[in-house]
Every structure is written in C-alpha cells, then in structure tokens.
Amino acid sequence: MGAELLNQDEVDELMSAAEQNGSQGDGRPRQIFSRVRRSNDQIDIQPYDFKRPERISKDQMRALEMLHETFARNFGASLSGFLRTIVEVKVVEAAQMTYSEFISGLPNPTSFNLLRCQPLEGQICLEISPFVNYPIIDRLLGGSNKELFIPQRPMTIIETRLIQKILQRATIGLHEAWAGIRHIDFVLGDMESNPQLVQIVPPNEVVVVIGFEVKMTNRAGPMSLCIPYNVIEPLVEDLSAQSWFVTGSSKSGTDTTERIAGGLSGAMVELEATLATTSITLSELKALEVGDLIVTHRPASSPAVLGVEGRPKFFAQIGQYRGGRALRIERAVHPHERIDLGGTGIH
C-alpha cells in the first residue's frame, strides 16, 4: 500500500491549525496544585535543591542563633568560674546542611558527644575540638597552657572523666537557654572520638549546626552543636522571632527587676522630718534677733512630715527612744494628698 501524500493546501491548513492550538495553550493559566489556594499571578516559583534542602526559615534560624548566644554567654561564665580563668564563648555561625556534610567537616579524633533531649525524641550532638579539650584538661591538672602539645589520639579514661564535668555544665547552659521555648532536660549520652562511627540520623537528613568559638587565655578552638530537624520539628512554630523575643524579654525583664531591686535594697537614703514651714521677706530675715519667734499656723500637736530624699512619704510623731530622738510613723502620705505645713509670720 503506497503512502498517501498531502498537497500544499492540506499542509498549510495543518500548520495553521497547529499555530492556533499553540497560542490557545499558551494563554491558559497554569494549574499549580497546593494546599493553599492562591492566584496563579501571585505564585513565586523558585528553584529547589534537593541535595541542600532548607526547612527552617530565616527568622527561625535567627531565633535559634540568638537563643544559643544566650547559651554561649552562660556557658562561658560557668567555665570561667570552674577553671578560675577568663573563658569566652561566642556564636560564629548558624547554618542548615545535611548530616553527612556536618560529619565530613569534623576532625578525627575529636570529642563527639550525644545529648538526649527529654521530652523530645531523638538526640543532638555536641562536638568539642581537641584545641579546646586539651587546654581545659591541662588547666584542670595545674598546667599553664604555654607550651601545650595537642596530641592526635583519642582521650584517655581520665581525660574523658574531666571533660564530662565540662559537658555537664554545657547541658545546664542549654537547659537555661531553651527554657524560654520549652522545658527540656539535656542528658549526656554516649561519647565517641570518631564522628564517622556515629549516625544519629540518615546522611541526607537536614540538621541545624551552631558553630561556636571558645577562647581561653592564649588558646582558642571551635565547638559545634548539631541539631537534627526531626528533633526540633515540634518546636519549629515556637521558634518564630516574635514569640522568642516576647518570651525572652519577659523573662529577662523579671530577672532585671529582681537584680535592680536587690542592688537598691542596700542603698542609703536621707530622711528628714518637717514640723512646719513659713516664709519671710529678706528684710525680715536680716532683722532677726535672739528671742524672736517664728510663728506658723500649724498646731504643735500636728504630726511631722517624714520625707525620703525630699519627697513626703509618711506622717510621724516626734518623741524619744532610749535617750535619742525618734519618729513613730502613723500612716503613709497618699499620692495626691495635700499637705499644709503652716502659714507665715514673725513675732
């Protein structure tokens, strides 16, 4: 059977029909399916890299960074008191990456410590560099860190026991920092020197890594906190910057008030008791002589006004107590109460 050939008119008709169908197809709105119905004109389409997924927004990352800045300050203060030297801990970065990327960037050996976060499920890990561990160990054993050699080997049992005291202070600092979001008990779990042997989540799982720098006298080294996304997923909504600021400011405001009140409680204030007041002219003041009486319209039985730093606060009666002058407070002065301390006149 021979092939059927089209003439030129039939070819032109097919080309015209194809062009019309193409223009109609381009004019149709593209259907994008989502859980939230929105206008197609307002949809912002952005490329997504499945190798480096980002599940936490920038505001939530900023909240996490500021939360761990609080941890860094508390942890540094705790280490300073424990080691009897100035230790400074500060946040240097906060980033999202996969667990395999985090592990590949760690030295071997190092101090790789797992922390349980009750009541949250899963574990987080706190990695402390040998450049931090061995100066701390040297300090605890009486050294000066001046000519300290950093060995490239796993820590001994004694060294591990000493670092556990540091890790216990780190768990306390994390508990205090996270208290504004939720009550979490951080408990030290397994300790490992080779991070490649520990897999708390799949290699492609998203983790949040908070990088710290620890400085002690003439030594400095990194420290990293790795938080898998599935651990903090129940708290993601609570990590918005607004809710965190409100919680943090409320707590810090209460602490500040108590600290200020404690400091002011020991401050000295000046008290004065005023019986009566009057006014005279300058010429009357110059003419005053011994024996002159300054008269007021206030009765002698009226209580004195006890002032604190020049402000009237109480009414009190004048008397004596154990041979000294004394004031017995009768009542407080009301905020808008009018006080009449007498009139004018000289006799």
Image (cartoon, helix red, strand yellow):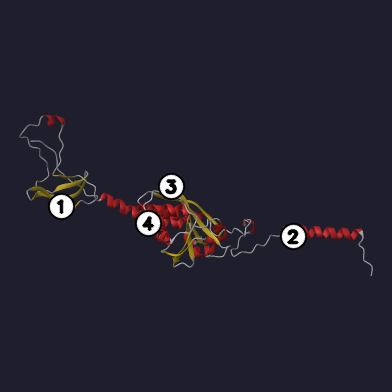
The residue type indicated by label 1 comes to Ile
Residue lying at the far left of the rendered structure? 291
Task: Tell me which label, 2 or 3, sits earlier in the chain.
Answer: 2
Q: Is residue 180 among the parts visible in the rendering?
A: no
Q: Position of residue 3 (x, y in %)?
A: 92, 66
At horizontal 28% and vertical 50% (from top left) the residue drawn is 263
At horizontal 14% and vertical 50% (from top left) the residue drawn is 316
Q: Pick the residue in front: 59 or 28.
A: 59
Residue lying at the far right of the rendered structure? 2
Q: Is residue 314 above or below residue 25?
A: above
Q: Give the Cα distance between marks 1 and 3.
A: 68 Å
Nearer to us of marks 4 and 2 is: 4
Quadrant of the drawing holding the C terminus: top left
Q: Secondary structure at mark 3?
A: loop
Q: Is residue 49 above or below residue 267?
A: below
Q: Give the Cα distance between marks 4 and 2.
A: 59 Å
The residue tagged 2 is: 25
Task: Tell me which label, 4 or 2, sits earlier in the chain.
Answer: 2
Q: Give the Cα distance between marks 3 and 4.
A: 44 Å
- Label disc, if present, on residue 251 of the rendered structure: 4
Q: Is residue 122 among the parts visible in the rendering?
A: yes
Q: Secondary structure at mark 4?
A: helix
Q: Secondary structure at mark 2?
A: helix
The residue tagged 3 is: 147
- Circle 3 crowding by C-alpha within 10 Å: few under 14, some 14–19, many from 20: few
